[in-house]
Image (spheres, rainbow, N blue to C red):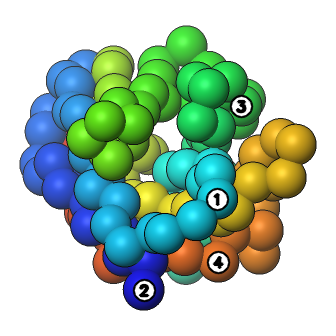
Amino acid sequence: QVQLVESGGGSVQAGGSLRLSCGFFGYTYGSYCMAWFREAPGKEREGLASIDEDGITNVAELAKGRFTISRDNAKNTVYLQMNTLKPEDTAMYYCAAEVMGWVCPPLGASSYGYWGRGTQVTVSS
C-alpha cells in the first residue's frame, strides 16, 4: 500500500519561504513520478510541479521562478521549496505519485493515483 505523508506547511507572512516535504512509503515495484498540487477553497486542484526518478522536472507556469521541486530517492522524499510567497498561495498542498511510463504524467489531478492528506499553507499580507 503506497502512502504519502506531507509536512512543512504553516503560516508565513508574504515574501516568506516554506519547504514542504513528502515521505513516500510502501511501493514495491516500478518507478514513480512525484508531484505537488494545491487546492484553495472554492477552486480546483491545480498542479504545481512533477519530478521523475532521474530528477527531470515539469513546472507549471504559475510556479516557475518561485517554486522548486526536488527529490531524494535514498530518503524516499520529495520537496517543494516555495519562495516569495503571496497571499494567493494560501491553499492545501498535496503530494501525489503515479507509476511512470517514459515520462511523468501531465500535471492534472486525474493523472495521479496516489495522494497524501495535504498540508495547509497560509500566507498573510
Q: Is residue 35 above or below residue 27?
A: above
- Between marks 1 and 3, how big is the CA–CA gap? 20 Å
- Residue under numbered circle 3: 58
Q: Which numbered disc covers residue 1?
A: 2
**Identity of the amino acid at label 4?**
Gly
- Between marks 3 and 2, how big is the CA–CA gap? 26 Å
- Between marks 2 and 4, how big is the CA–CA gap? 12 Å
Residue located at (22% from left, 25% from top): 17
- Name the N-terminal-most of marks 3 and 4: 3
Q: Is residue 9 above or below residue 3?
A: above
Seen as rendered, the residue at the extreme right is 102
Which dot, 2 or 4, sits closer to the camera? 2
Coordinates of residue 99 in the picture (x, y in percent): 69, 62
Q: Is residue 45 above or below residue 48?
A: below
- Residue under numbered circle 4: 113
Label 2: element kind? loop
Which dot, 1 or 4, sits closer to the camera? 1
Seen as rendered, the residue at the extreme bottom is 1
How many marks the image carries: the answer is 4
- Name the N-terminal-most of marks 2 and 4: 2
Coordinates of residue 64 in the picture (x, y in percent): 61, 21
Residue located at (42% from left, 86% from top): 1
- Name the N-terminal-most of marks 3 and 2: 2
- Between marks 1 and 4, how big is the CA–CA gap? 14 Å
Q: Nearer the viewer, residue 106 or 88?
A: 106
**Identity of the amino acid at label 2?**
Gln
Label 3: element kind? strand
Label 1: element kind? loop
Which dot, 1 or 3, sits closer to the camera? 1
